[in-house]
Amino acid sequence: MPVQTTRRDLLKGITLGAGATLLSPILDQVAARASGEARTSRRVVIVTQTNGFSPRHLVPSGVEWRNPNGRSASARLTEVSLADKNLHAALEPLTLFKNRLALVQGLSSRIALGGHSTNQGCLGAYPANRGPLGPTIDHLLAQAVPSVFNHVALGMSGAGLLNYRLSASGRGQATPVICTPELGFRTLFGSVAAGQGQRDFDHRSNLLDFMADDVRRSRNALAGEERQHLDNYLAAFEALHRRQNEIAGMRDQLRRHAPNLGNRLTTTVTSTILEAQFETGAAALIAGLTNVLLLSSGGGEQNFGRFPEFGINDLHAIGHGQSVGNRTYEDCFVELRQFHCRLIAGLATRLQNMREGNGTMLDNTVIVYLSDSADGHHPSCYQWPVVLMGNLGGRLRTGGRFIDYPAYGNAGHRTLANLYCTLLHAAGRPRDRFGVTDPGLRDLDQSGPLQELLPA
């Protein structure tokens, strides 16, 4: 009696060429689904934004903001469901994902105190005024959930092609955030080819053209739902290609007309760079090239960037409370945060639309959103507002909650380092110490994860 060839065996038999690195993870997922397996991957996305994160922006409707430096500071833990609450206007674009959020208030990281930025201190929980003292959380998470590219860092900078101020793989080992879309695109997708393949890629940056033969063989081996699943992945590459074409066309146009554009030269570029980097990062996650993604909007020293497309040319000025036209500095901060939240929501939507295991890619992801400058332009670091979206496949307990920890110095107060320990526990690399302990809290236990964010 002949042995029946299963769909999974057929998929395994596909011979891939230039597109092997990109298509293999995708076909593995399709094969797993074809055999009834619920294969998933854990993913962490960290989004940092320059110029501080006002603690007021984290507080939902009907909840009092407890200023840690004022009379409303509390010595007790508060938890509030977001189910019947409205998010602050600054976070409104995240409303669709409200039941996946944990808005975490009251964490401190005084040890990372900086000027306009804490640099690697944000993700490292240590003073970084003389350079990184150890690995930042993104690199430790990358060790916990490795992939083709263990660590990917993309962003926007007002100071050049690379930003070495935010991330580090170890003591004295600063690692760059790639701050141009073209370099990010080619680093991730051009580097999967070698020799003649690399030269072909340089001349044909359309990923689907580059992988045309592999895509054709793969699609011919699939049918119905499996082919649709592959097409959903390929759509990510198509969107990325469209974005690259837009950037390339804009770059040429701006170069030709730069003398006439003046300050408007960066008007579209700033937001387009961020949009492009989010697009590239999403494609890298969907393709299985990485499981840990750092996306930064400025950050490090006085590297604020500019957003003249929003009429905001000077983020330093609004950080010092200056108005812009008829808008207050608070109006400007809200508008900028809404823009970044739209990017985060767009990334989340892309992951939510990709099936994985018995759910979606978003089900197995956590997105962490914070500022490299803690609670303000010149941060006190008594509070470090954090937005968490997603539960990392059930390894975190978010579920639409606002959590406000006791104020600095009070029993039960927790730090940013405790949050990072929590992420490491959830990622399968548990540790109870991270960074440098705060001498101002020497009478409190600064070890361990945040139990409120771990499953009971």
Image: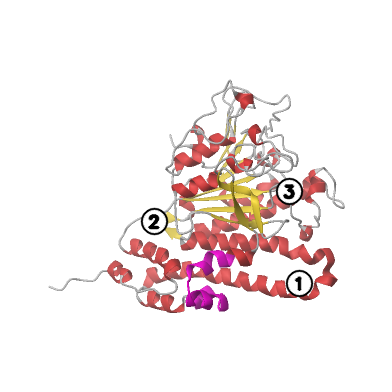
Q: CA distance from mark 1 to mark 3?
A: 29 Å
Q: Please tell me whether mark 1 or mark 3 is closer to you in this view.
A: 1
The residue carrying mark 3 is 334
Asked whether 383 or 248 is in front, the reply is: 248
Q: How far apart are the alpha carbons under marks 1 and 2?
A: 45 Å
Q: Residue furthest top?
A: 443
Whether residue 270 appears in magenta in the rendering, the answer is no
Against 60, residue 181 (above or below) is below
Q: Is 207 in front, or is 188?
A: 188
Disc 1 is placed on an element classified as helix
**What quarter of the picture does the N terminus occupy?**
bottom left
Upstream in sequence: badge 1 or badge 2: 1
Q: In the image, which disc is placed on residue 379?
A: none
Q: Quick check: 17 left or right of 154?
A: left
Q: Is residue 6 visible?
A: yes
Q: Is residue 350 above or below residue 387?
A: below
Magenta stretch? 185-210
The answer for how far apart the CA atoms under marks 3 and 2 are is: 37 Å
Q: Residue at x 77, y 61 (%)?
A: 309
For residue 400, which quarter of the picture? top right
- Kindly identify which residue carries mark 1: 254
- Pointers 1 and 3 in contact (CB under 8 A)? no
